[in-house]
Image (cartoon, grey):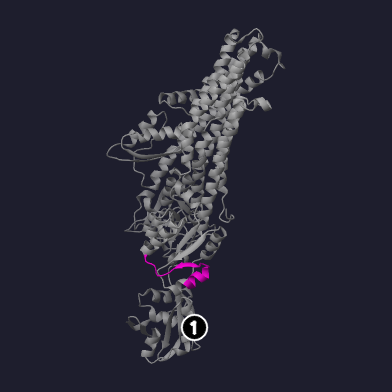
Amino acid sequence: MGMSCASCVRRVETALSEARGVRSAEVNLALRRATITYSPSETTPDAIASAIEQAGYETVRPEPAPVVEIVEASETLDAEAAADAHEVQELRRSLVIAVVLTVPLLVVAMSHGLLPWTESTFGRWLQFVLATPVVFGPGRRFFRLALVALRHRTADMNTLVAIGVGAAWLQSTVALIAPGLFATAEHVHAPHLYFEASAAILSFILLGKLLESRARKHLAEAVHHLVSLQPKTARRLRKDDDVEEEVATSALVRGDRIVVRPGERIAADGEVLRGPSAVDESMLTGESLPVDKNAGDEVYGGTLNQSGALTVVVSTAGKGSALARIVEAVERAQSGKAPIARLADKVSAIFVPIVLAIATVSLLVWFAVNPTAEGFAIAVTRFVAVLVIACPCALGLATPAAVAVGTGRGAELGVLFKGGPVLETVSRVNLVLFDKTGTLTQGTPSVTDVVDATGRGEDALLALAASAEKPSEHPLARALVRGAEDKGLALSRADGFRNVPGKGIEARVDSNVIRVGTTEWLREVSVDPSPLEAKAEELAGRGRGVFFCAVGKELAGLIAVADPVAPGAKQAILDLRAMGIGVGMLTGDRERTARTIGDELGVSEIFAGVAPEDKSRIVSERRAEGRVVAMVGDGINDAPALAAADVGIAIGSGTDVAMAASDVALLRSSASGVPTALRLGRATLRTIHQNLFWAFIYNLIGIPVAAGLLYPWTGWLLSPVFASAAMSLSSVSVLMNSLRLRRFRVSMPAL
């Protein structure tokens, strides 16, 4: 608490880095949060908080407990929300006081004789009476923080405001009490007062601070909203009598059974034991349509049960749940500092001393040009205007505000960025390499073709083959059984099941001997497969696995199995190409199968038959060519390539190893989130560039105008009042521009 500009961030980071036991520290101005790596054997959180407080800033200290459960995370966020609310309340109170006194002060000071009494001694002392409570009431926060900076032999935005406001008030007070000090033979009238400037400056700055504080609440909404989705209690079934009992969500463990009624949110990740129902998973996938859930289907904590009651067996609760991982990823991303932020850090380190120097030079030059009482008053006005307009608040907010909104919006769309630097790298990706199995394809074989040679019909043939294969545990046998069940076919009992390794199986089904296998297997049992061999060759050429089926000594037909293209994969590749991004595919499958999938998806750069270490090597080779590479995968064998890429992207159905090795996690089990991630990265970086432009342009234009550099040619002089308004507007414009990212849509055109 108490940070106001990039210089404040630098001071807190310096204080933390010098603290005993602290290894690294990153401070986010937009969220007013520090990410600190420290050695528990050398220091404690209380000691670290004390280091921040000694640097002149306040800290929020939640109850000392390790944040390993999402419920505990909510308590920390509640403490932060309470602190934010208190600051907004304080700023609102200060602003009301300042405005109530400043409005009549402006009327008196700027009437310019329209009200005759305003030029009298009474009118001049009335200005003092109205301005002084503003300067030393609402304005004392800036003087206090400026003194803290001075004790640390540094300067920040508060220094600029305090010196500027103090100089205007002091010069006016001296001119009021001892006007003779400013009188000359030519100018015997009462010297001009700048009380209205000091009060108006503080009013505008307080308004800007209030708007900033309210905007910061929006920046943290993503995490707060996600945490609020986690129910605090759950209905658990007791193991002995199946009686429902209400328990804290944090008390759930793997294997517990919970009941979720319609309209309630699911308390933990798990598998449906009894259903059915429809579940709103939009918080994970961004899809508005509910997903039907039946026994055996997975459900996730925080999602909304809509139509029917569900009984769920808990698989993961607390830290490892999908919702907890989302919260952790978003917080980590919003706390991470993007590389582009270093530019703002470097500038802010030298900015304030340069501004003080420019203001001082302006004071001396203007007074040298006109060494009179009037000239001195004008010189003081230029001095104040330069100090006020040069506030570096916008510079410090430019990057963290955009990163905070971008990562929050990504979480809402099912894209988790694991740090601010990731967002920047994602925006520069120009080549995406996909793993095939489970990423571009569904990852499980399915029946694609059934060719009947006897007139029984395709369904009858599939039912016979699936019945015979049912006792088998082979993945392809499981595909046949699943294909028949998906069609609702009734399967018969198989007797005398026999597996012939490398050839096929046979079993007796409804008094018929059914054989499923290779052409060699059928020829060995005197069945001629030649009538269907041409068809089998055609299907094999399209990447299908083909199995002949015989009933007794009769060729019954053939069944083809393949790993089909995943929904959304083709559109994802089309979207990437529309963005000007190259696409390639890596797979351990054979060349023919890989080419078949590649042709279907429109991928020409294919690497087939590659081992996990080869995938990593290929990624490294492309990077060595100067490409910015994103690797997309889902399995353990993809982890080396994910780690080797500039950006590793793991899809939602992937293994924990793949998720850990990646930089971006897609919560959907689909490649369709890849274009969304890259577009959002580009949009965020573009917003950062815009923010930096606005932050710099205000100063590049405003400081020379405030110093009076254009006066000899244009006659322009910037009032300190308008300078304070421009300074506040610069910070607010940066925050408002960042908040536009909340309107980012998946369907938006490539950037």
Residue 90 in picture, x, y percent from top left: 50, 29
Q: Is residue 604 magenta?
A: yes
In the image, residue 234 sits, relative to residue 588, either above or below, namely: above
Find the residue positioned furthest to the right.
114
Relative depth, front residue between 309 and 381: 381
In the image, residue 321 sits, relative to residue 687, either above or below, namely: below
How busy is the neighbourhood of tag 1: few (under 14 within 10 Å), some, or many (20 plus)? many
Residue 441 visible within the image = no
Rendering quarter of residue 610? bottom left
Q: Check disc 1 and report the residue beneath it.
A: 451
Give amino acid for label 1. Answer: Val
Residue 57 in picture, x, y percent from top left: 42, 30
For the N terminus, which image quadrant? top left
Q: Is residue 244 left or right of residue 222?
A: left
Relative depth, front residue between 736 and 614: 614
Secondary structure state at the residue bearing disc 1 = strand
Q: Is residue 222 magenta?
A: no
Find the residue positioned furthest to the left.
41
Relative depth, front residue between 1 and 584: 584
In the image, residue 406 sits, relative to residue 590, either above or below, namely: above
Stretch of the chain drawn in magenta: 595-611
